[in-house]
């Protein structure tokens, strides 16, 4: 109330008159006659426009940051889905621990909805409830590490089975194809079809194997068990 706009205008006018009388050599003038501005030549109007532009830029930056964070979040979710796809192939029976399930269930405020979505116990990955459990409760990095270990273990097993099949009479040239396809070679150069997984291929090869071939396989398995620190 004391420092109103009217009071300030009168004070400024009085101050100007006083300074012009007291220091005429300094040639004081009103700002609106010489153009109010700054040392860089910008006017007050320019300053206000710059402030508005800065405010607008800040809002745009926040909006872009929000969009970037959302995109990053979606990318992480896509990656988790891809990791679970791999695990569903190599380890379909994977499930969360009972403790993890119990802790999550104890925290829920909607028990009925919880059971509908996650089931009434830890479920394997091959079931929708199990996938929901792993997706919602286990972070992507932990799942990725698990998928890598499972995939490497599966690859080693397929390599070992391919070597067994070769020792039992399958041509060594088909090793990579057997590893890639889980034993199913496909059509051979002589027109024969060998589309059988290891679970069928190897038992059939054993039935037709010679004593020498069986001995080689037995030695191979012993060497593998010794190398991995397991007993026969």
Image: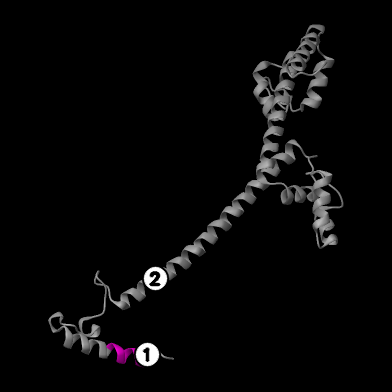
Q: Nearer the viewer, residue 198 or 106?
A: 106
Residue 37 position within the rendered picture, expressed as x and y whole percent measured from the top left:
26, 76
Determine the image quadrant of residue 36: bottom left
Name the dominant secondary structure of the magenta segment: helix
| Residue span colored magenta | 6-12
| Secondary structure of residue under mark 2 | helix
Query: What's the residue at 74%, 50% (across, down)?
Result: 137
Where residue 106 appears, x then y in whole percent? 83, 55
Task: Establish if 108 lies above or below 177.
Answer: below
30 versus 99 height, above or below: below
Q: Which mark is residue 5?
A: 1
Residue that numbered label 2 is attached to: 53
Which residue does the image show at 81% across and 51% down from the upper left?
A: 103
The reply to whether residue 186 is visible in this rendering is no
Q: Quadrant of the N terminus?
A: bottom left
Image coordinates for residue 201, horizontal then vertical, percent: 78, 23
- Residue 191: mark: none
Residue 114 point in image, percent of width and height: 82, 58
Which of 154 and 43 lies nearest the eye of the viewer? 43
Residue 187, compared with residue 94, is above or below; it is: above
| Colour style of the rendered protein structure | one colour
Q: Is residue 164 left or right of residue 40?
A: right
């Amino acid at each position: 109330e004391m420092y109103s706009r009217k009071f300030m205008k009168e004070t400024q006018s009085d101050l100007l008159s006083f300074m012009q009388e007291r220091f005429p050599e300094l040639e004081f003038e009103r700002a609106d006659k010489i153009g109010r501005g700054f040392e860089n030549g910008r006017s007050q109007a320019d300053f206000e426009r710059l402030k508005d532009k800065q405010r607008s830029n800040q809002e745009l930056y926040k909006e872009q940051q929000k969009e970037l964070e959302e995109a990053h979040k979606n990318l992480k979710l896509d990656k988790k889905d891809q990791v679970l796809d791999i695990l569903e192939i190599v380890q379909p029976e994977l499930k969360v621990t009972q403790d993890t399930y119990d802790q999550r269930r104890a925290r829920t405020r909607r028990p009925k909805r919880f059971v509908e979505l996650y089931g009434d116990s830890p479920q394997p990955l091959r079931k929708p409830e199990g996938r929901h459990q792993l997706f919602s409760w286990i972070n992507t990095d932990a799942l990725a590490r698990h998928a890598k270990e499972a995939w490497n273990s599966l690859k080693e097993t397929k390599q070992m089975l391919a070597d067994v099949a070769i020792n039992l009479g399958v041509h060594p040239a088909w090793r990579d194809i057997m590893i890639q396809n889980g034993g199913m070679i496909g059509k051979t150069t002589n027109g024969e079809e060998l589309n059988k997984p290891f679970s069928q291929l190897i038992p059939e090869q054993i039935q037709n194997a010679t004593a020498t071939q069986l001995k080689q396989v037995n030695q191979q398995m012993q060497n593998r068990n010794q190398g991995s620190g397991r007993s026969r």
